[in-house]
Amino acid sequence: MKLLSYFRGEAFQRGVHPPGCKHTADTPIRRLPFAPRLVVPLSQHIGKPSRPIVRVGEEVLRGQPIAEADGWLSVPQHAPATGVVEAIELRPSARGPWTECIVIRVYEASTQEVLWGTPQDLDAFPPQDIVLAVQRTGMVGLGGAAFPSHAKLTVPEGARVETLVVNGCECEPYLTCDHRVMVEQARDLMTGIRHAMRATGALRAIIGVEDNKPAAAEAMRRALPPGSEIFVEEVPTKYPQGSEKMLVTALFGVEVPSGKLPLSLGMVVNNVGTLAALGRLLPAGQGLIERVVTVTGPGVARPGDYRVPLGTPISFVLDYAGAPAQARQVILGGPMMGQSVASLDVPVTKGVSGVLVFRGEDMAGREGRKTFPCIKCGECVESCPMGLNPSMLGMLAARREYDAMGEQYHLGDCFECGCCTYTCPSNIPLVQQFRVAKQILREKAAA
Ligand code: SF4
Ligand code: SF4
């Protein structure tokens, strides 16, 4: 087929090969029961927080909208379980700052059945109405970015989308939630892809999956609708293949220009988990109330992929999966780009793909590792997929020359993949320095 001649199936340049540790890849998804209380933040997405539309004391049904979108770059929230609104108050978030949350006391008899939603015939909808239907689901990028999906599927005037790139790489070590979704929900994924293609006007969809997931590739190939313009393409396993720009390069051999989006090349990239969830929710007219989360790490007795109601406290997830209370480090997301949580009271939100648990003995030799001066070995430069010079950026960060980092050494192109930190023999916390520098530059720009 002519189209396939565009595919390269080669890896992007540089990157790293950390151990996969995908121990949960062959275990089917299990459902987590309801915690006694669910804490639903009004800001689980990039953009304006949603506005509550329920009052304290009000009964809510599983799936009922409880907060509405506040403007275009915002999404609604839905009740993950049947219960009563106990509070609308500030609670700590995984990122640190306290945010407004709706706290639901779950009825003991709350059913897993979704009690809200009206089936809709998406095939009869014009593209702009599909986009609005996506916004009503409250969907955001489930790969971790949490960018509102309806905004991503909106094609700006004058632009044209030819290809929907479906990201099934899941390149972070340990994480297997996308893998299990591709194996178990391949039909939902095809439905989601079909609606996303209609919303964007894409002529074809390419599902990029790393070649360490043959079962996922096979399940998706079996689910391909006959005669459809949807293709499954395997790419070599390499971190950070799951980044949008790297995947576009691996599939098509072209680079997304600095400061631009894949849209500049006529492409929109969506994660498999997002599209599979949309494929399930859109026809039913329902909202996003749960997601698949990989709960794993050496400190977990019953690791696996769990379907977790949004708002479930991390401590409840860890109790259920058998993680010791004295776990030394808990990371939300993958080990390369995820974030440590200071408090286990924070809830699972739409962007949480993994909960990783490490014990004291797993951290031996890692905690308090001594940092040495840069020896100019060039390992970080060799590993940076964006072609940056992390060594120089690190030196400028140490001297607090933040403007030079941005203006001369393209700090804005760094997407914090952590490859440079991973390879540095001097243990220099490069990516941490870059996060701080970016924050300072953002604050300066805002001022
Ligand atoms: S964290 Fe930034 S500088 Fe370091 S390798 Fe990744 S993109 Fe390059
Ligand atoms: S990897 Fe570390 S030691 Fe080597 S050049 Fe980069 S910052 Fe310096």
Image (spheres, helix red, strand yellow):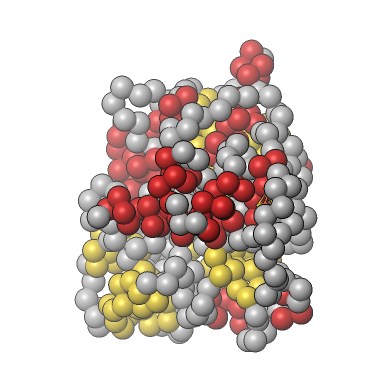
The C terminus - image quarter: bottom left
Q: Is residue 225 above or below residue 140?
A: above
Q: Residue at x 22, y 67 (%)?
A: 53
Please tell me whether residue 199 is drawn above or below residue 43 in the rendered image: above
Taking the spot 73% from the left edge, 47% from the top edge, the residue there is 377
Q: State the image quarter where residue 356 is shown.
A: bottom right
Q: Which corner quadrant holds the N terminus?
A: top right
Confirm whether residue 397 shows in the render.
yes
Q: Is residue 232 left or right of residue 243?
A: right
Q: Position of residue 103 (x, y in %)?
A: 35, 78
Residue 361 drawn at (x, y percent) = 76, 79
Q: Left of 430 or right of it: where is 62?
A: left
- Residue 250 or residue 130, whichever sits in front: 250
Is any atom of residue 191 visible in this view? no
> Closer to the camera, 303 or 284?
303
Q: Position of residue 86 (x, y in %)?
A: 31, 83
Seen in the image, is 98 located left or right of residue 178? Answer: left
Residue at 30% in and 50% down:
445
State the residue at coordinates (71%, 59%).
426
Instruction: Give percent across and percent down for residue 183.
Output: 67, 49
